[in-house]
Amino acid sequence: HFVYLKNKTGGYLFIIDLGQPLAPQGPFDVIVHKLSDVIVESEHDQQSKHLLANFQSYVLAHPGTVLLDPLPAMTRLLDRFTSYQIMSKLHKSLRGVPTSRYCFSVRLPFNITNYNTFVFPPVCKTRVAHGSLSHEMCLIFSAGGLPDVRPPCVLQSFVSHGAVLHKVFVVGDRHFCVERPSLKNFPSGPCDRKTIFFNSHEVSKPESSSHLTALDEQTPSLPPPSSEAMAALVQELRVQLGMALFGVDVIIDIRTHTLTAIDINIFPGYEGVPQFFPSLLDHIKKVLDQRAIGIACVWQNSLVLLLSVWGAHWCGLTWHQLELINNLD
Ligand SMILES: Nc1ncnc2c1ncn2[C@@H]1O[C@H](COP(=O)(O)OP(=O)(O)OP(=O)(O)O)[C@@H](O)[C@H]1O
Ligand SMILES: O=P(O)(O)O[C@H]1[C@H](OP(=O)(O)O)[C@@H](OP(=O)(O)O)[C@@H](O)[C@@H](O)[C@@H]1OP(=O)(O)O
Ligand SMILES: [Mg+2]
């Protein structure tokens, strides 16, 4: 399939056929993509490996093409272990913002004696953060539930948060917050409850309705997170990730009222954000304007260098003398 559209701002939009050489389909100013499937599958599938290599070689050969978002930045988020490390660094750098209690995660298989270093019940998630299997999770309530855990996975401390998830959707320098249903509160500490298996889409999609998200009526509701705290969180994340199109899932601890980021999503669905497309177009425009300024600066610097070399030659100066003059400020 090949779509050829002219948008309102006069730019052309194409759907790129990854199976074909990219150069004849270009040139492209900006490529917007979600190659998560291809990246994950390229680990074991030759065709995906080939598609990815084809794409990467185009990107390498065309450094002027802006990629939304860069592949290395995205790839880090496909591994929950790496993505939780990013979240914990963010915690350290967010001074003064009421954000704390970041998630603790461990690699499995781990020394079984280590289990008493985490608080029950942890949420167990697949290490790979993309694909239908990645949404299958479980809550384990005691060491007796550990055999239910299927490595490779990460264990994240469960934070009781009043069954409200705050999804933050980022598009460049803008972000949008929407509320979603979420897991209900569970008491902290081991108990003899059976492992609860769940699919994240059954509990935290807008239409989700599950017994796992139903709070009892006396539970007081929490105030929403402050817009300053959310803006600071997004700002820190943008710097840490080097990405423009991502989502972060935030919950509020019912006891301490502090924010906890539990998940970072690559190019999420932006459901409930009607401003998504205009914001994306604005962001693309900004990126292209910055690129044009960058190109103009390179031209200007090259011109200055050329003129000084030519002037030096004309005055009979050596390269070393020219360097000395340039360093006089
Ligand atoms: N640490 C935690 N503490 C409390 N609840 C959690 C925690 N981690 C996950 N949950 C619950 O599980 C749900 C799914 O978690 P998570 O966002 O990691 O799943 P996902 O499959 O990566 O979701 P997405 O659709 O955003 O990719 C959350 O919306 C929340 O209800
Ligand atoms: O399909 P949807 O539009 O709901 O998008 C979800 C998408 O699910 P998919 O697996 O069906 O593509 C997920 O992709 P992977 O984690 O598997 O990459 C993830 O990005 C979620 O963050 C998105 O949900 P949201 O964050 O917007 O709730
Ligand atoms: Mg996710």
Image (tube, rainbow, N blue to C red):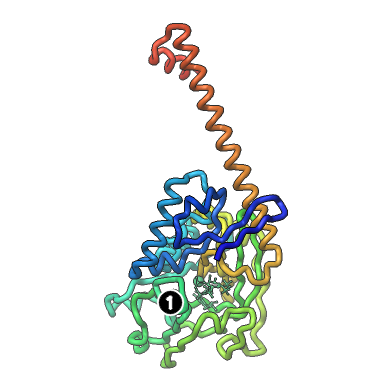
Which quarter of the figure is the N terminus placed in? bottom right
Q: Position of residue 87 (x, y in %)?
A: 47, 62
- Position of 12 compared to 129: left or right? right
Crowding at mark 1 (Cα within 10 Å: few <14, some 14-19, many 20+): many
Per the image, the residue denoted by label 1 is 125
Q: Determine the residue positioned at 45% across, 76% down.
A: 134
- In the picture shown, does residue 293 fall above or below 5? above
Q: Residue furthest right?
A: 8
Q: Residue furthest top?
A: 316
Residue 72 visible: no
Q: Determine the residue positioned at 56% across, 27% down.
A: 300
Residue 159 visible: yes
Q: For ligand 2, which image quadrant applies?
A: bottom right
The picture quadrant where one finds residue 49 is: bottom left
The picture quadrant where one finds residue 152 is: bottom left
| Closer to the camera in the image, 51 or 190 | 51
SS class of the residue under badge 1? strand
- The number of numbered discs placed on residues in the rendered structure image is 1
| Closer to the camera in the image, 93 or 298 | 298
Indicate yes or no: mark 1 CB to ligand 1 under 8 Å.
yes
- In the picture shown, does residue 266 fall above or below 145? above
Q: Position of residue 289 (x, y in %)?
A: 63, 43
Amino acid type, callout 1: Lys
Q: Position of residue 327 (x, y in %)?
A: 46, 19
The picture quadrant where one finds residue 299 is: top right
Q: Determine the residue positioned at 58% across, 58% down.
A: 14
Q: Position of residue 200 (x, y in %)?
A: 52, 80
